[in-house]
Amino acid sequence: MGRVGVIFRSEHRVTPYEDALRLVGIDPIRLSVTAQKEWPSKIDGLLLAGGPDIHPIHYGCEPNGSANNYDEERDRAEIEQLRFAIDCGIPILAICRGMQLLNVCRGGTLLQDIGPESCHLLKTTEADHPGRHRVAHPVMVFPGTRLAAILGVSTLDVNSRHHQRIETLGRGLTISARAPDGTIEAIEGIGDEFILGVQWHPEDRVLASATDLEIFKAFAKTLTKSGRELNSR
């Protein structure tokens, strides 16, 4: 149905993302951070996965001490591949850190820490079953957005495990969902191209939530069209 690139480090497991992609007929292609020359010149889609905080230098700020797990090599690699995908009109699905990176790449900024009392900090545990992770809070989906058309609901209970969030929105993007505390939970591109970012982790809920699975189904559907267009160029 389509090939989707997922950037990773060799020591990192990205299995939940790969499993979710395969569940809807997508072939995941691993793109190594340290071997950019080996990236395929043509992929049908790009998935930006979760991971460490993005270094604030990429959105014009200095670190405030709330994070120390930056991976600047990965930042640079993903920004390069994201810009390539945007320029080529390749469909993009961005999850958690990936959504934040999408926003930063479009000139937006992040709040470096949302505070210790936030409902967004609920972590998954060893007892959580793959694909059936527990929920943390609801999100409100904005009518008229691509996300609303995909999900077919106005509210959705989601999982969550992040301590940063979007502060100012990047250019060419619009907000498609928020949490009750105002946190931006989903963004999407303005226009016909499939550019969608979600702050939660739908790949960890696809066996428990048919609605979360719809995100990957919609991604797969747009890949079929994208692949035909790319191959005709």
Image (cartoon, helix red, strand yellow):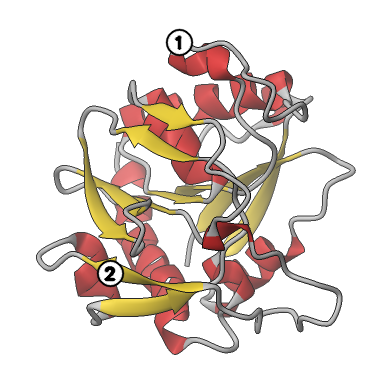
Mark 1 or mark 2, which is nearer the start of the sequence?
1
**Residue 145 at least partly seen:** yes
Q: Nearer the viewer, residue 207 or 134?
A: 134
Q: Position of residue 121 (x, y in %)?
A: 62, 57
Which residue in the structure is indicated by mark 2? 140
Q: Position of residue 125 (x, y in %)?
A: 80, 72
Three-letter amino acid code of the residue under disc 1: Gly
Three-letter amino acid code of the residue under disc 2: Met
Name the residue rendered at 59%, 50% in the picture. 162
Please tell me whether residue 212 is drawn above or below residue 13 in the rendered image: below
Please tell me whether residue 217 is drawn above or below residue 178 in the rendered image: below
Which residue in the structure is indicated by mark 1? 60
Name the residue rendered at 74%, 79% in the picture. 130
Please tell me whether residue 176 is drawn above or below residue 167 in the rendered image: below
* Left or right: 124 as drawn, with respect to 104: right
The quarter in which the C terminus is drawn is top left
The answer to which image quadrant residue 39 occupies is top right
Which element carries disc 2, helix, strand or loop?
Answer: strand
Q: Position of residue 34 (x, y in %)?
A: 79, 25
Number of other residues with Cα within 10 Å of mark 2, as a class: few under 14, some 14 to 19, many 20 or more: many
- Distance of mark 2 from mark 1, alpha carbons? 30 Å
Q: Residue furthest front?
A: 117
Name the residue rendered at 71%, 64% in the picture. 123
Which element carries disc 1, helix, strand or loop?
Answer: loop
Name the residue rendered at 65%, 65% in the picture. 122
* Left or right: 92 as drawn, with respect to 195: right
Q: Position of residue 141 (x, y in %)?
A: 25, 68
Number of other residues with Cα within 10 Å of mark 1, as a class: few under 14, some 14 to 19, many 20 or more: few
**Residue 195 at least partly seen:** no
